[in-house]
Image: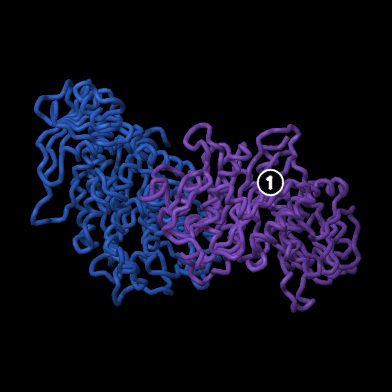
Amino acid sequence: MRLRPRPGGAPEGRPLILPLRGAAPPPFAEAAAAAGFDAAKGEALRLFLPREAVLVGCGDGSPAALLRAGAAGLRALWPQDRAAPERVAMDVRGFAPADAALLAEGALIATWTPPVPRAEPWPSPPRRLDLLCGEEEALRPALEAAEAVAEGVRLARDLVALPGNLLPPRAFADRLAALEEADLAVEVIGPKRLARMGAGGLCAVGGAATSGPYLVTLRWRGSIPADPVVFVGKGITFDTGGVCVKPAKGMEEMRADMAGAAAAAGAMLALARRRSSAPAAAVLAIAENALGAASCRPGDVLRMLDGRSVEVVDTDAEGRLVLADALAHARRVLRPAAMVTLATLTGSVVVALGHHRAGLFGSDPPLMAALAAAGEATGERLWPLPIGERHRRDLESDIADLRHCVPAGKGEGWGGRFLPDACHAAAFLREFAGDVPWGHLDIAGVESLAQAGPFGPKGMPSGFGVRLLDRLVARHFEDPHRL
Amino acid sequence: MLDISFAKPSLPSSGALALLLAEEDVPGALGPWDEATAGALRRGLEAAAFTGKKGQTATLLAPGGGLAKIVAIGLGPRASLDAKGREAAGGAAAAALAKEEKAVLDARLAGGAEAAAEVALGAVLRHWRFDKYRTTEKPEDKPKLSALPVLTEEAAKAKAAFAPRKAVAEGVFFTREVVSEPPNVLTPAEFAERCKGLEKLGLAVEVMGPKELRKLGFGAMLGVAQGSANEPRMVVLRWEGAKKKGAKPLCFIGKGVTFDTGGISIKPAAGMEDMKWDMAGAGTVAGLMAALAGRKAKVDAVGLLGLVENMPSGTAQRPGDVVKTASGQTVEVINTDAEGRLVLADVMHYAQDRFGPRLMVDLATLTGAIIIALGHEHAGLFSNNEELAQQIVAAGEAVGEHCWRMPLGEEYDKKLKSDIADMKNVGGRDGGAITAAQFLQRFVQGRGTDKATPWAHLDIAGTAWTTKDHATVPKGATAFGVRLLDRLVAEHYEG
């Protein structure tokens, strides 16, 4: 679906989406009253008289509510059992360009369908969305940015939706290599070279799979002569848990264990598409945590890329091992101005924060504040969590430089049942971030939709992180004077 | 309590000596002690590679001058030495001297009178031990130290500075003791009885039993209690210390489940013995009230304890039961092991109804989820009031009882929706500590308006008990919250 700003009123005969922050305007007022429509509730109301239209409430007017309103409006015009009208319009007169762009972005994101082939294809979305506005020129740049970001979100969701057999490490790396088309510089390091480099964490985790592991670097040069901001993503294409195999229940969701890498790649695509001035890069650790003769074992001691040794306690805490090597590689090769890790890292963060916020950790308060602010501005909300002295102490190993997690059942008190694993994981990663300003988003719990809604059915990818990272760069790394 | 006295410096000629030394003092400022030991102190510290680093200790045996031993304790660089550092050094000294019959602690190099009092506080806090049930321990295995003179140039001033700290320590010990008591001893009635004992400090103590609670409409709390042979109690402890009469008091509310089996939704056996400390919130509030009264704090404060035992039995409440809380709101009990919030709901409502408090802080060992979120170094802090939350975080930092702010929000509250009642008592495993806090917030009067009672909730499930010794907290009950809330009151609400 393409976006097009269009000055003036609503063209006749074309379905209209009408985002509302208050009462419905005259031609729709009666119908709205009859349905008890309340814009503050953020509902969508489909009308056929006096014309085909969808009234959609903007809720509390927050970025998340606007995005959702745009999506709900489009979805109401496009039931999944039939093709959408070719062209639809959305009346954004009276909205500031940034808010109008959020509405449009929501509509764009709502057009996504899973990329998996079916005999009966998904009905196609509208081809064009006209944004009815006052001044075309005021809106155009915001819409272009929205299109760029939505394309990044689409990429991330496509990648996350693909199951383990359709996106093994090799295919993931190939998909990323194809991003050269977007003017990103791509470097793919395969298993042999990784072994030679000594990327012991990544090689151990990915060793039992039929393809991979890979370490993929995407670079966007930008136009500011500065060190890049670097996104480091966890890309476990499928996570069986390895030798410490997961329970069968819910294991199919582990196709999404590469959502961090997907979001980082999506953000890079967004930056490239909107020709961001900021230099940026993504380092993506791609592997399948498979169960096989070459799997790594609990008790194994690995030699990591940065030279440190790590005792493996639980092979299902594999994400931090691949990220440790990716962080070391990023530091060594890219001279990062800042690093942000994104990973579906722990179940613990889901117990901590549920499905409404991702966990935010880091070593650099200004960067963490910037991440939190970008999250608020995009509706991809974060909540800070601590890395305490004791979290680090818990990772002391009797045999290696450190261990990567605390054994199950070895917590303090309560029969040892409760472990702050998200904090432990962050404490572990901090060791490999060195002195580079570093933030870490544990996105387990938010990488998929927690409930069915205008963005899709429950459990489908959310694309969480793409919009947040794009906003982080726009707000903090595009200032030419930041040096 | 370790008997602390403050004395002008004089050279002891027997027993043990603990010396607190900053990095700058080694080896320059060893002074009279080095002379008394004919240079042995300097030589010994050198051989032990003692540099005065924070937390470092070195023990020199038979150093001469008649002394049995000298324990040197590092304070770190003097510029970064703070109250917490001095308390920790006092704690380290107490631990190192525990087996001595006679010992003195030289605190002069830690600072003046205030510093000496802080060192002394650290020593008493660490020295505390709960051993009333050890009947066969050999005398040589027991700690022998019962008195500790602290050497300072300003003995009289130090004694005065120590007095309020001693009162707070007494409060901490009350808390540690009730938390440590086994559940067959500390039933709700026994807990209430011990609270009665606090009347001697000037607290007004009321105890209410099932009959009164029924009259008050405490359906949620009584539902939890109904499975146990031990009757529930609510204890109200009042301290009126404010100069101005008739001001709105501060309310502190504690969860006091004297033993939590989980009820019909019974817990796994492993670690269930830890559930004797599921009354730590109430224990902390009682200890806090003792501290405030003991140091005659200029504040009006009320402590309210909801005391019950959660047992499975023929009379126990069932998953699926609907109970009516004192506020009139109804709750569908999905999990009988989420009982703490049911108790707090009724007590919080009562506290606001009766006292119209200026603010309300509840403490509870409420969820395992908070440990999965934060571990054991921070308590979870939830609040509807920015200012109060910041005050609590700062007070916690000052005394080394750390709190970490956790989120609240409508999106979490939605998970409590019930098909049959006003709410369920659990919102699922995900975000479990947050949904528990959301549940409590439903009992904050005026919620969602600017007239809402300022409220904070501390989930202390991860911090109420420790399996390791810490500088001023020996293994076991920590009394986390007593010093924090005492500091909160002292900093912001007295006068």
Per the rendering, the colour in which chain A appears is: blue
- The correct choice, above or below, for A186 with respect to A135 in the image is below
Q: Badge 1 is on which residue? A: B486
- Amino acid residing under circle 1: Asp
Category of crowding for the residue at label 1, using alpha-carbon neighbours closer than 10 angstroms: few (below 14), some (14–19), many (at least 20): many
- The correct choice, above or below, for B2 with respect to B353 in the image is below
- Image coloring type: by chain
Residue at the (38%, 74%) spot, across then down: A297
Q: Is residue A10 left or right of residue A373?
A: left
Of B491 and A308, nearer the camera is: B491
Of B228 and B2, nearer the camera is: B228
Q: Determine which quarter of the picture holds residue A211.
A: bottom left
Q: Label 1's element?
A: helix
Per the rendering, the colour in which chain B appears is: purple
- The correct choice, above or below, for B467 with respect to A265 in the image is below
Of A241 and B260, nearer the camera is: B260
Q: Is residue B3 left or right of residue B305?
A: right
Residue at the (90%, 69%) spot, across then down: B66
